[in-house]
Image (cartoon, grey):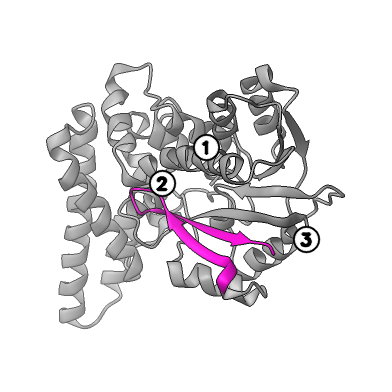
Amino acid sequence: MESDELVEKTKGMQNNQTDSLRSEENNMPNSNCRSDLQSLNNQTLIQLDYLKYLTSKGGPEPDEYDKLTACFRSIGDHVRQGHLRYEEDISVWWKTLGEDFSSLHMMQGFVFLKPHGYAGDFEIIDRIYQHWTSPYAHLVKWDRYSHEQAASQAVRNRKTYFCNLVAGSMHSHPPAKMDILNVGCGPARDVLECLQLQKDIGHISIDCLDQDQKAIAYAENLTKDYSSQVRFILCNAFKYKSEKDYDLIWSAGLFDYLDDKSFCFLLGRLFGNIKSGGGVAIGNFSENNPSRDYMEFGGWFLHHRTEDQLFELARSCGVPADNIAIEKEPEGVNLFLRIKKD
């Protein structure tokens, strides 16, 4: 989730969805088709009206969360059925709903507007990590809804997962020095919290790789108290070449932006830099993501994968089955592909 690999920028706003449907209706000679189209038009407008209603009263209350989630699911169903299009129709809805729904000073508005040019940037990830809420009172309820999402909790859980992963490695096989590569590091708050929890950090060295200069600057400032343990590298992961080998290669939120071909290519490239006995841990959102429709409504698209798909991707890269494990955080939304190198 922290890198902009293969993620398209949101395109410009186009014709109003309602006008488009009415235009199609006028060209349909069959009365049954016209009736079906009018029914679809009414259904989608009900969802838009509900979002307008919530926006007019300053966002959803907790007892409205389930209905709001169902609203986004219904919109997602219309998209999957081909009745609505995210880039053309839904973007017009955002404009219709106005700044009280899509301001940069709120979580969902930041996601939709993508001020850094890509989805899942370092700033929105760190806002999720910190339960950030808007300084403007009329936007806070929307932020609270965003943070209650299973996807948001899963993102926070992966910090804990990384900290436990490093602690477990240090305890079970304490190396003289543990070298870690963090690919698509984003804000590096997982690195910060990991180092804060360790009693003896002198044996840990972490290289953080990201292609966004602003992400690097942000992360460097965040981890400035640990500059002797953390080194930042500005580079595209696909172009990164290292003469150094690592005990652990960690990538929390890059690989679920990649298609299968790119996933395997990058995994194979990184695998050559793992020490014997070391391993890889790769985060990827599961298809079991109840927040998916809300995310995609905001233009945040991922390659969701099942446990079996992750296993087969690793196998297709030549990894022996016995060296592969699939783990998950408590929400079951963020999966982790674990690979050990003999």
**Residue depth check, mark 2 versus mark 3: number of the one nearer the observer:** 3
Mark found first going from the N terminus, 1 or 2: 1
Q: Please give the residue where the numbered disc 3 appears in the rendered image.
A: 272
- When asked about the image quadrant of residue 50, the answer is top left
Q: Is there any visible trace of residue 128 in the rendered image?
A: yes
Nearest to the observer: residue 292 or residue 193: 193
325 falls in the magenta region: yes
Q: Is residue 11 left or right of residue 269?
A: left
Nearest to the observer: residue 224 or residue 235: 224
Residue 300 coordinates in the image, percent (x, y):
46, 49
Residue 342 coordinates in the image, percent (x, y):
69, 64
Pointer 1 with pointer 2, Cβ within 8 A: no
Q: Please give the residue where the numbered disc 2 appears in the rendered image.
A: 298
Q: Is residue 104 left or right of residue 77?
A: right
- Identified at 56% across, 74% down, the residue is 321
- Identified at 62% across, 48% down, the residue is 250
Q: Specify the segment rendered in magenta.
A: 322-342
**Residue depth check, mark 1 versus mark 2: number of the one nearer the observer:** 1
Question: Residue 163's mark?
Answer: 1
Q: Amino acid at mark 3?
A: Gly
Q: For the residue labelled by badge 2, is the local secondary structure a helix, a strand or a loop?
A: loop
